[in-house]
Image (cartoon, grey):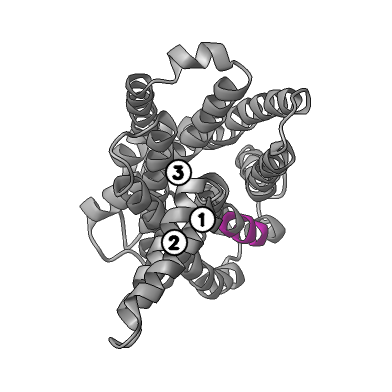
């Protein structure tokens, strides 16, 4: 996680030339805007992804490969959202937690971000194999292969995040990368390229190919549920591009600004970065809805959880048998 000052957005780039620009208004805007929007993203992302984790862990003992990927996507999102309160505090008051927490929180952010993107990509490939390559998937979509894939995804996410742990440090109440003199030019660009290519372009291309193939297969088969499946796929793809494209465009513009190809002090980019960044971050709140809770077992879990809360909150004189019949009816509706 790199920042130009304690008050500036948690963007990936660090441009020393920006220090000569008048950042007072942007810093004041960030102090109010970012914490106010990080708070709901943190709460919704934390609650939604914890529900996914609990639903999978407390579910059947026999886990499917889909369960493994959904569980790890939720864990990735949790690592990501856990870092947001620290960045919100940093924006408002500067970094006062020390050097080691600075490195740890920055690493959690990056590992969670890239892990989430990679697991979204893996889930699209898994769905493609299950529907388009159904015969091949019988051998490929095993729990052992899923566990091996999961290990590989985490390894790559951690590897990509290593430079942030190495270079990020606390300096004068700032938690930002401090690169050696011979790396000052290349590493900020590397971060932008990693964000644009690994964190967006590759996942976007893989998702588009897989879901286009899935839709084409569904259209050619006779299934009364195919319309719902196609609608869900379109929601997944449209939401992904809608939430992540603007932020990646701004990251690319930051790269151009680093090379002085556009105005160094263009305030629109700074304000737009705040807005698009928060929009992109809020995608982790929707992952539980569009990936997990659209499934049957997760809806069942939510129904049971809701009824348990009712039993806990309702007066002791409530008719337990009536509540059990109600639970049975809701369970049937969920299926």
**Lower sequence index among marks 3 and 1:** 3
Q: Residues within 10 Å of mark 3 (few under 14, many from 20)?
A: many
Residue at image mark 1: 332
**Label placed on residue 328:** 2
The image quarter in which residue 88 lies: bottom left
Is any atom of residue 278 visible in this view?
A: yes
Q: x and y percent of residue 134 in the render? A: 57, 17
In the displayed structure, 63 sits above or below 110; it is: above
Image coordinates for residue 9, horizontal then vertical, percent? 52, 59
Which of the two discs, 3 and 2, sits closer to the camera? 2
> Which label belongs to residue 70?
none
Crowding at mark 1 (Cα within 10 Å: few <14, some 14-19, many 20+): few
Label placed on residue 113: 3
- Precedes in sequence: disc 3 or disc 2: 3
- The residue drawn where x is 74% and y is 24% is 221
The residues colored magenta run 271-278
State the residue at coordinates (58%, 72%).
29
Q: Is residue 292 left or right of residue 315?
A: right
Dividing the picture into quadrants, the one containing residue 63 is top left
| Secondary structure category for the residue under label 2 | helix
CA separation, marks 1 and 2?
6 Å
Secondary structure beneath dot 1 equals: helix
């Amino acid at each position: 996680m790199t920042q130009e000052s304690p008050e500036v957005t948690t963007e990936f780039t660090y441009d020393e030339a920006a220090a000569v620009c008048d950042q007072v208004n942007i810093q004041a805007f960030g102090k109010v805007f970012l914490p106010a929007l990080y708070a709901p993203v943190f709460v919704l992302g934390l609650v939604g992804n914890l529900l996914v984790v609990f639903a999978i862990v407390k579910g059947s003992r026999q886990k499917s490969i889909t369960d493994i990927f959904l569980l790890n996507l939720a864990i990735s999102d949790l690592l990501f959202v856990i870092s947001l309160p620290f960045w919100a505090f940093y924006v408002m008051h500067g970094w006062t937690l020390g050097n080691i927490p600075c490195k740890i929180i920055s690493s959690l952010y990056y590992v969670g971000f890239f892990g989430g993107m990679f697991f979204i990509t893996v889930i699209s490939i898994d769905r493609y194999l299950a529907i388009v390559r159904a015969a091949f998937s019988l051998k490929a979509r095993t729990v052992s292969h899923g566990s091996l894939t999961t290990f590989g995804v985490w390894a790559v996410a951690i590897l990509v995040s290593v430079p942030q742990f190495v270079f990020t440090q606390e300096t004068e109440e700032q938690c930002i990368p401090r690169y050696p003199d011979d790396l000052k030019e290349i590493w900020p660009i590397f971060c932008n390229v990693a964000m644009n290519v690994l964190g967006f372009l590759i996942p976007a291309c893989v998702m588009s190919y897989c879901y286009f193939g899935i839709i084409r297969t569904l259209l050619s088969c006779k299934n009364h549920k195919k319309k719902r499946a196609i609608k869900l796929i379109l929601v997944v793809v449209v939401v992904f591009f809608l939430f992540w494209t603007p932020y990646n465009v701004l990251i690319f513009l930051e790269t151009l600004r680093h090379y002085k190809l556009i105005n160094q002090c263009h305030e629109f980019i700074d304000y737009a970065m705040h807005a698009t960044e928060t929009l992109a971050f809020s995608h982790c709140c929707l992952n539980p809805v569009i990936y997990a809770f659209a499934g049957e077992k997760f809806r069942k879990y939510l129904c049971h959880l809701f009824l348990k809360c009712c039993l806990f909150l309702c007066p002791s004189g409530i008719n337990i048998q009536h509540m059990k019949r109600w639970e049975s009816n809701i369970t049937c509706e969920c299926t």
